[in-house]
Amino acid sequence: MNLDNYAPVSERIAAFWKDNPDGRITTRLLVDDGTRVLFKAEVYRNAEDAYPMAEGYAEEIRGSSNVNRTSAVENCETSSIGRCLANWRYQASAERPSREEMSKVEHFEQAFGATAKPTSKPTTMSPRSAAEPPSEKQLRLLRALGSTQTPATKKEASDLIEVLKSVQPRDAEEPF
């Protein structure tokens, strides 16, 4: 994996402000229970807009990485902004995940001897279906894959499942 193929969140934010000088980025801490941190970010084309152009969520587990030992809240807030901007149109690279997200995947691969490998073919779903809450089947699969995240939509759940499947440890049995 070449992290140079992925844009950092700071580039996404710069592109947003360039295109939307009167815009607004908001974040809200949803959970901080001492272990888990969850943020929601919203972006608005204009500061006075009533509805956001996009939203994004991020979750971090305190102590799960070097940065999360000291800065889980800040890391989580930044990740939620990056996901939110990518959900609208600010990927800032050919790849949707941010450099920070892919750095986590790389860390996982190094720590657990995992290799990224292609998984099933991409899923196709209608825009309406993609925006629905994740199904129970998706949530069970995410738990089986070791995820502690709770995606907001079926699309987010599908994307997370694909990432988790792609970094399964070598010689690991499928959890389903």
Image (cartoon, grey):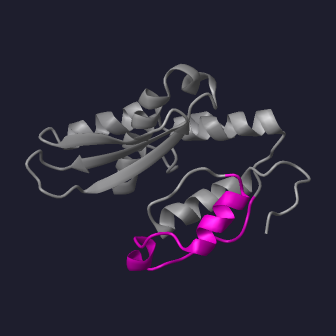
The quadrant in which the N terminus is found is top right
Residue 136: x %, y % from top left: 58, 73
Q: Does 147 sit left or right of 173 as displayed?
A: left
Q: In the depicted view, which residue is nearer to us: 1 or 49?
A: 49
- Residue visible at 42% across and 73% down? 132
Give the residue displayed 44% in from the left and 30% down from the top: 73
The reply to whether residue 25 is in sight is yes
- Does the segment drawn in magenta span residue 130? yes
Report x, y in % for residue 36.
52, 39
Left or right: 25 as drawn, with respect to 36: left
Range drawn in magenta: 118-146
Q: Nearer the viewer, residue 21 or 138?
A: 138
Residue 90 in sight from this viewpoint:
no
In this picture, residue 59 sits left or right of residue 25: right
Residue furthest top in the image: 70
Q: Nearer the viewer, residue 74 or 17?
A: 74
